[in-house]
Image (tube, grey):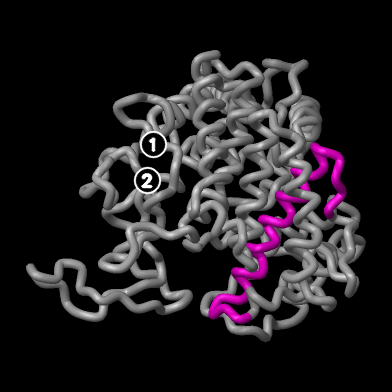
């Protein structure tokens, strides 16, 4: 190869790299009105990327790798499952309880193998076929990755794909989901749906709420009608969460289910304009959640009883740290709150630090320990001012796919498992 040819190849490669890693100036003056993420921080990260910040460029490469993988997948819809939900409406969301197992071999007279029994922490593989659970998780993850990738690169293909996914699942009359979770985590031959199934959405749906805010800064192909349609869907869903029997039962839960319910409620309230409800929900979480759920040593007793205590301890803190982020938008500092015994979010994160950094073993029951599960919640505490967490950041284990914290500073459950 001649020197001129090699130079041409190099220039082509550099141009391609720049197309992935250098953000455009699209919507430069608009700050995303996100519920959990800090829109101003996103805007600042995009500016730093434009100036060549090497750490952010590495993170953006990981993010665009994830976004690229979604481009030839989906869209997904609730109407293509093999059987409708028990009520018979194919537009109703359906999922199956993950830790419940058949006790007999299915037969023509007993096609499910009933009765079902619970095996805590052991996921029944049949729940991943025949329901909407896996597809809705793809909807949540893809729209989050794609909207962020568009925001940081300006590539319209990401925004257009995110819009297609959202319209198919939530808006198009032929394929849309009804805004309720009446048949979430059903148990064959036992319950047509359960209140705890709300966690199918509450653990991740705020990612969609923030994706909508990001797309709303001017994403190509995301129209005013799309924005109005999603606002209407979210308003109806918020009404169901507040007023349905299942919503009320989940809101009364004393463990991670209740924390996630509050977080989802506050995010939806903020996104649909009810900032008073968002603020009240965050304020109430002090006495309602932190006081009874976090011990004076920072442990979370309800989560430590689980067969996957590490997972559920980090899981609950995903909800708390996201709720604290929503609080920042409505003038509530949940991070510095201390209960009657001195309990609080900083202590809860600090309790995880020895295991999160590899300095000590996790001594509670755990069927599948992943050290990186705590990475995001430690980042969140460090950003909020926790000195011990700040010292721990450099010793954290990066999750699969890279540490994306600086590009999407809101905790995710990195060792995801059905709730």
Residue 228 figure quarter: top right
Q: Residue at x 46, y 27 (%)?
A: 161
Percent across and percent down for residue 80 are 26, 40
Dot 1 surroundings within 10 Å: few (below 14), some, or many (20 or more)? many
For label 2, the SS is loop
Distance in Å between CA atoms under marks 1 and 2: 6 Å
Of the numbered discs 1 and 2, the one sitting upstream in the chain is 2
Q: Is residue 35 visible?
A: yes
In the image, is residue 162 part of the stretch drawn in magenta? Answer: no
Q: Is residue 400 left or right of residue 262?
A: left
Dot 2 surroundings within 10 Å: few (below 14), some, or many (20 or more)? many
Q: Is residue 49 visible?
A: no
Q: Decide which of 10, 322 is in the foreground and name it.
A: 322
Percent across and percent down for residue 12 are 56, 22
Percent across and percent down for residue 143 are 52, 35
Q: Decide which of 28, 97 is in the foreground and name it.
A: 97
In the image, is residue 309 part of the stretch drawn in magenta? Answer: yes
Q: Residue at x 74, y 54 (%)?
A: 321
Percent across and percent down for residue 152 are 66, 28
For label 1, the SS is loop
168 in relation to 217, above or below: below
Q: Assign the magenta stretch its main secondary structure.
A: helix
Q: Which residue is mark 2?
A: 93
Q: Which residue is mark 1?
A: 177
The region drawn magenta spans 305-334
Q: Decide which of 112, 355 is in the foreground and name it.
A: 112
Q: Decide which of 118, 146 is in the foreground and name it.
A: 118
196 in relation to 342, above or below: above
Residue 400 figure quarter: bottom right
Q: Is residue 29 left or right of residue 15?
A: right
108 in relation to 263, above or below: below
Q: Mark 1 and 2 residues: CB-CB less than 8 Å, in contact?
A: yes
């Amino acid at each position: 190869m001649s020197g001129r040819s090699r130079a041409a190849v190099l220039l082509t490669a550099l141009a391609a790299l720049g197309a992935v890693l250098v953000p455009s100036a699209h919507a430069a003056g608009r700050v995303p009105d996100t519920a959990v993420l800090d829109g101003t921080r996103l805007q600042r990260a995009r500016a730093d990327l434009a100036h060549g910040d090497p750490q952010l460029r590495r993170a953006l490469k990981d993010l665009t790798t994830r976004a690229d993988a979604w481009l030839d997948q989906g869209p997904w819809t609730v109407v293509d499952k093999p059987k409708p939900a028990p009520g018979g409406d194919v537009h109703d969301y359906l999922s199956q309880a993950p830790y419940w197992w058949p006790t007999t071999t299915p037969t023509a007279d007993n096609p499910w193998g009933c009765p079902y029994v619970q095996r805590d922490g052991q996921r029944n593989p049949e729940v991943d076929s025949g329901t909407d659970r896996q597809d809705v998780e793809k909807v949540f993850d893809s729209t989050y990755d794609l909207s962020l990738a568009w925001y940081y690169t300006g590539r319209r293909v990401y925004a257009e794909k995110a819009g297609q996914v959202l319209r198919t699942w939530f808006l198009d009359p032929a394929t849309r989901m009804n805004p309720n979770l009446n048949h979430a985590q059903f148990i064959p031959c036992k319950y047509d749906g359960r209140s705890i199934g709300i966690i199918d959405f509450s653990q991740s749906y705020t990612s969609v709420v923030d994706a909508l805010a990001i797309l709303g800064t001017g994403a190509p192909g995301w129209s005013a009608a799309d924005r109005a349609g999603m606002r209407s869907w979210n308003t109806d869903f918020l009404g169901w969460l507040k007023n349905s029997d299942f919503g009320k039962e989940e809101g009364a839960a004393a463990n991670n289910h209740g924390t996630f319910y509050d977080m989802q409620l506050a995010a939806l309230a903020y996104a649909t304009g009810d900032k008073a409800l968002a603020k009240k929900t965050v304020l109430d979480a002090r006495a309602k959640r932190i006081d009874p759920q976090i011990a004076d040593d920072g442990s979370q007793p309800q989560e430590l009883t689980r067969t996957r205590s590490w997972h559920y301890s980090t899981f609950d803190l995903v909800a708390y740290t996201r709720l604290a982020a929503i609080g920042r938008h409505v003038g509530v500092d949940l991070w510095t709150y201390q209960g009657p015994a001195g309990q609080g979010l900083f202590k809860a994160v600090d309790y995880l630090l020895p295991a999160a950094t590899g300095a000590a073993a996790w001594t509670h029951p755990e069927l599948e320990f992943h050290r990186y599960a705590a990475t995001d919640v430690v980042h969140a505490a460090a950003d909020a001012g926790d000195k011990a967490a700040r010292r721990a950041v450099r010793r954290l284990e990066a999750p699969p796919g890279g540490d994306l914290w600086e590009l999407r500073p809101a905790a995710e459950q990195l060792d995801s498992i059905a709730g």
